Amino acid sequence: MVTSLLIVAAATLAVAATAMLVTALVARRLGRVNVVDVTWGVALTLVAVLGAALSGAGSSWLLVVLTGVWGLRLSWHVLQRSRGKGEDPRYETVLGTGGFRTAIWKVFVVQAAAIWLVSLPLQAAAVTSTRAWWLVGLGVVVWAVGLLFEIVGDAQLAAYMRQPRETRPPVLDQGLWGWTRHPNYFGDACVWWGLWLIGGLASGWLPGLLTVVAPVAMTHFLRNVTGARLLEQTMSQRPGWDEYAARVPLFVPRPPRRA
């Protein structure tokens, strides 16, 4: 098992590094780093396919379907949203005045390592057998809730952005955006907790314990580092934001409060 785990871990790292190398070359040609967001979902889908091909287990192929639906939808959504636009303000903040060499270390190397870390449940499923199928079912439910938050949240934001700037409210506070200030990031976290239940915990307490760092790290980064907190540095400049933030939670949803 140890040998199989090392093979899967090394192969996963190779996939992540290759994906980021190709993305870095594309980013340099386009002159913007945010193309890395398109690669994220595709790379994790490739990792899931790799694990299933090496193991052939039914749970691994289930993870291919779930990761692929989530990852390819996300990559397509990000591609459509960023087409024709410049650099993402989040990456401008991360890079500061540094050039492309700074982006290599602060973005592409970090993202390759993050793909390897977050994919630990996918790797575990490739070298272990499923022991608790009820946890697989629970994981699918959690994954579905997360995907629903992402799809509905993105659709509501797109509808808001299509309204004329002069007539739409300065802050979107309707639908899921009245329950949480970042429904898409919360949904993303739920997706990976669901995949951990399927690929990690369902294989036993030890694989679950060794791989729980993946959804924990994903949730931490989405909430506190590259996701919600970083985005709010820009969003908080909008009129009405303070009142919105006072009644709507940052991450975990709750029923809307009155002003």
Image (cartoon, helix red, strand yellow):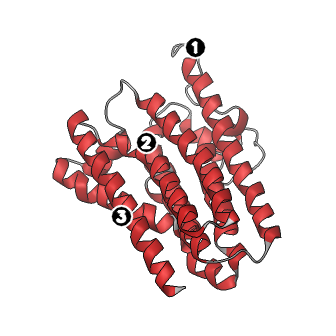
Nearest to the eye among marks 3 and 1: give it.
3
User: Which part of the image, by quadrant, shows the N terminus?
Assistant: bottom right
- Residue of label 1: 167
Residue that carries the numbered disc 2 in the rendered image = 38
Work out whether 114 lies above or below 166.
below
| Helix, strand or loop at mark 1 | loop
Circle 3 residue:
14
Helix, strand or loop at disc 3? helix
Q: Residue at x 55, y 47 (%)?
A: 71
**Residue type indicated by callout 3:** Ala
Q: Whole-Å distance between the Cαs marked 1 and 2? A: 31 Å
Image position of 230 (left or right of 206): left
Q: Secondary structure at mark 2?
A: helix
Q: Quadrant of the C terminus?
A: top right
User: In which image quadrant can residue 160 be found?
Assistant: top right
Residue 211: percent from left, percent from top? 57, 75
Q: Earlier in the sequence, mark 1 or mark 2?
A: 2
Work out how far the residue at label 2 is from the one at label 3, CA to CA, in angstroms.
Answer: 18 Å
* Mark earlier in primary sequence (3, 1): 3
Give the percent coordinates (x, y) of residue 116: 44, 66
Front one among 39 and 175: 39
